[in-house]
Image: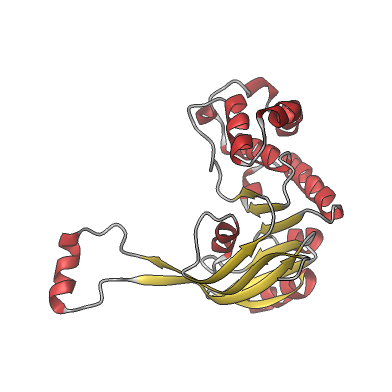
Amino acid sequence: MSTNTIIKFDHVTKRFSKNNHKTFKEFLPALIRGEDIVNTFIALNNISFEIKRGEVIGIIGPNGSGKSTILKLIANVMSPTSGSVTVSGKVSPLIELGAGMHPELTGRENIYLNGSILGLSQKEISKNFNSIVSFAELKDFIDTPVKHYSSGMYMRLAFAIAVHVNPEILLVDEILAVGDTSFQSKCFTKMEEFKKDKNITTVFVSHNMEQIKKYCQKAIYLDKSQVIDFDTAVKVCSQYSKNKP
């Protein structure tokens, strides 16, 4: 892997089992008949690509094409079934709304919890605390348990924490869709700042082609678990739009 490559997927396949919920009793008839009881689906099928340090990369494609799976592999939330994923940097993931948040803890406590999980010391979190609260616009609710937060408040807190932990890699998976328009604008302004910082790499999943074209230099187009194209955002979005039913 070249020194400028921060993320590399090398012939990565990811399979999931559809049978996790079944009991032995439910499997028994198939076992007696000699049938294959392992029912799997392929989320990613032998994909390879490299992302350079400082790039802003969009990931587009229909539902179920493997977009979120790529982010989870980068974040090391899961491992590939085969192939390898190499990541050379500190990852700040915004993958699932509320992930990493403890519902019984207050916003204040969750800032310290999440900051620690993402690699900050207590001193560093305290230094950034006021900036996080201000960015999230949650000053009046920071000592409220987050189980009482709306989805928009959850998103604001999660995004504010993620962008204040000095990430080398920021992963954003459509969580911005739950925010109000003014806060979305604030988030994209922050992403523009990251775009100018050649040390921060952003990987952004969205169904909004205009956002992808505006904020991303390149885009990966996924369909049926495979990479269809990886090129400039404008070119890839154009191809995707033509192929949509």
**Image position of 216 (left or right of 105):** right
- As drawn, 32 above or below 25: below
Asked whether the viewer can see residue 138, the reply is yes
Q: Nearer the viewer, residue 140 or 193?
A: 193
* Vertical side of 24 occupied by 48: above or below: below
On the image, which quarter does residue 32 sit in? bottom left
Q: Is residue 111 left or right of residue 2?
A: left
Which color mode does the image show?
secondary structure
Above or below residue 119? Residue 222 is below
**Residue with the most extreme right position:** 196
Q: Which image quarter holds the N terminus?
A: bottom right
Q: How many marks?
A: 0
Quarter of the image for residue 66 reads bottom right
Q: Where the C terminus falls, by quadrant?
A: bottom right
Q: Nearer the viewer, residue 118 or 56?
A: 118
Foreground of the two, 2 or 191: 2
Residue 155 % position (x, y):
62, 40
Residue closer to the observer: 88 or 230: 88
Q: Position of residue 93 (x, y in %)?
A: 62, 49
Q: Residue at x 74, y 43 (%)?
A: 166
Q: Residue 124, position in %: x, y?
A: 72, 31
Residue under the image location 58 percent in, 75 percent down:
47
Image location of residue 241, percent across then percent down: 69, 73
